[in-house]
Image (tube, rainbow, N blue to C red):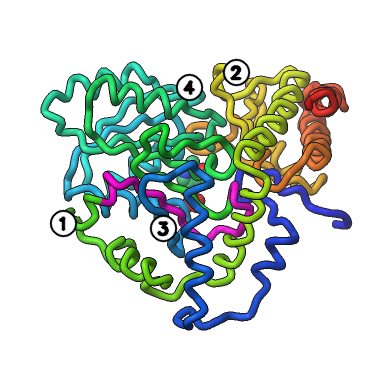
């Protein structure tokens, strides 16, 4: 098809030309005396993305899923008890990963489309007077439903319960897009991947650890090898990695950090907010509703749109892809066929989204959903035009 493709899934996101160029490099010797410059440039700047001064950051050749494992096996003893909220496919998979590793997870079941119930987290922790629960697992931005949690409120609940559990935050679809306050929220492990807010291909797992979490690395006895932070810390301190790093992705990450930090993380978050407001206006104008049950929990990185009763979202996604060159995210888990997801994170802007929303509108009409062509796009343009 002539023209450009609109990759409007919530990750991987479009890669800016600048980052494609940064990665288009010959391989280099990752044991050379020059190599530490790159390692240090990345590891010293990653904390700024999440406002972290307490602890360290690590980069693995991995995806986000691997960082769930890395975070747990380096900080939790075998069979430890953890607390998690399930409110979408990614929180479900985080729980599954912990269970696959032999951890015991107490799960707070929450309707998909809702946010994590802070009162229930607090009650569970307050009831655990023996402090058996060693960690709280929370997905900051549930990519399956388009819901963002208030991590600061969860930290406040943990503090009110005076509970010492570590706080693990999956920020795969929030970090480098939404405001993320590692220090202020008392996060112990932050988990990210390269293919969303960092605007790179998949292939890097990014892990932030607090001093409190790092203190556990040396003492936990959980078997680990590839994700063992001990050799990683040792080598990183000298500017190297314990095994062959994903070099081209590291060149890309280094430049992505320059892009993000030059723009400023507050400006990055504000830009994502602005894009999201327009997409939500479009959904409203179509007469459809979002999977996120309340406006205040709606995500600024993606919007999951619920199909009218009896209509299959997969059909809209397929029409959008085949006829209009727009990729939309599918419904996952119990939302399969019920929602389609519009990614509005990373390297995108109002006009790109206007094009993508036009494709969505045509696909909806083709699939038999009674909307007026231009209604959603017009509503979005109004928000983008008047927004500062
Ligand atoms: N957590 C969240 C919130 C995600 O959105 C994803 C992927 O989309 C993952 C974890 C898994 O990350 P990956 O696909 O990079 O392994």
State the CA–CA distance, disc 4 to disc 3.
31 Å
Of residue 226 and residue 40, the one placed in the foreground of this image is 40
Disc 2 or 4, which lies upstream in sequence?
4
Q: Which mark is residue 114?
A: 4
Query: In screen coordinates, is 166 left or right of 358?
Result: left
Q: What residue do we see at 29% from left, 25% from top? A: 158
Mark nearer the viewer, 3 or 2: 3
Q: Which residues are magenta?
A: 196-214
Disc 1 or 3, which lies upstream in sequence?
3
* Quarter of image, res 340: top right
Disc 4 or 1, which lies upstream in sequence?
4
State the CA–CA distance, disc 4 to disc 1.
36 Å
Q: Quadrant of the N terminus?
A: bottom right
Of residue 136 and residue 254, the one placed in the foreground of this image is 254
Q: What residue do we see at 47% from left, 59% from top? A: 43
Query: In screen coordinates, is 309 left or right of 235?
Result: right
Mark nearer the viewer, 4 or 3: 3
Of residue 129 and residue 31, the one placed in the foreground of this image is 31
Q: Secondary structure at mark 1?
A: loop
Q: Which residue is mark 1?
A: 221
Q: Which residue is mark 2?
A: 295
Disc 3 or 2, which lies upstream in sequence?
3
Q: Quadrant of the C terminus?
A: top right
Q: What residue do we see at 18% from left, 53% from top? A: 220
């Amino acid at each position: 098809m002539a023209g450009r493709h609109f990759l409007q899934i919530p990750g991987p996101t479009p890669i800016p030309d600048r980052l494609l160029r940064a990665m288009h490099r010959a391989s280099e010797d990752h044991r050379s005396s020059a190599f530490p410059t790159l390692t240090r440039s990345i590891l010293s700047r990653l904390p700024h993305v999440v406002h972290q001064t307490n602890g360290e950051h690590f980069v693995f050749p991995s995806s986000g899923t691997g960082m769930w494992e890395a975070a747990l096996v380096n900080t939790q003893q075998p069979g430890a008890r953890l607390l998690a909220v399930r409110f979408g496919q990614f929180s479900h998979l985080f729980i599954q990963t912990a269970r696959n590793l032999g951890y015991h997870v107490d799960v707070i079941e929450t309707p998909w489309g809702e946010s994590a119930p802070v009162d229930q987290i607090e009650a569970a922790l307050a009831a655990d007077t023996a402090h058996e629960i060693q960690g709280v697992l929370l997905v900051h931005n549930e990519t399956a439903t388009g819901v963002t949690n208030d991590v600061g409120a969860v930290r406040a609940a943990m503090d009110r319960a005076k509970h010492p559990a570590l706080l693990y935050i999956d920020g795969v679809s929030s970090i480098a897009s939404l405001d993320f306050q590692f220090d202020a929220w008392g996060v112990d492990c932050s988990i990210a991947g390269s293919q969303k807010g960092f605007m790179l291909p998949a292939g890097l797992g990014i892990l932030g650890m607090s001093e409190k979490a790092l203190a556990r690395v040396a003492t936990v006895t959980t078997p680990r090898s590839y994700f063992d932070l001990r050799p990683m810390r040792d080598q990183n301190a000298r500017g190297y990695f314990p095994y062959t790093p994903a070099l081209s992705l590291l060149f890309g990450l280094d430049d992505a950090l320059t892009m993000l930090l030059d723009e400023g993380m507050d400006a990055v978050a504000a830009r994502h907010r602005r894009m999201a407001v327009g997409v939500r206006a479009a959904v409203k104008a179509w007469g459809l509703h979002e999977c996120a049950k309340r406006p205040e929990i709606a995500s600024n990185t993606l919007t999951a749109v619920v199909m009218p009763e009896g209509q299959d979202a997969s059909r809209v996604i397929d029409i959008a892809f085949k006829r209009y060159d727009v990729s939309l995210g599918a419904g996952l888990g119990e939302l399969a066929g019920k929602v389609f997801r519009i990614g509005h994170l990373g390297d995108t802007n109002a006009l790109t989204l206007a094009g993508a929303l036009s494709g969505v509108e045509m696909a909806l009409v083709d699939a038999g959903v009674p909307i007026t062509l231009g209604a959603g796009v017009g509503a979005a343009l109004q928000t983008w035009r008047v927004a500062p």
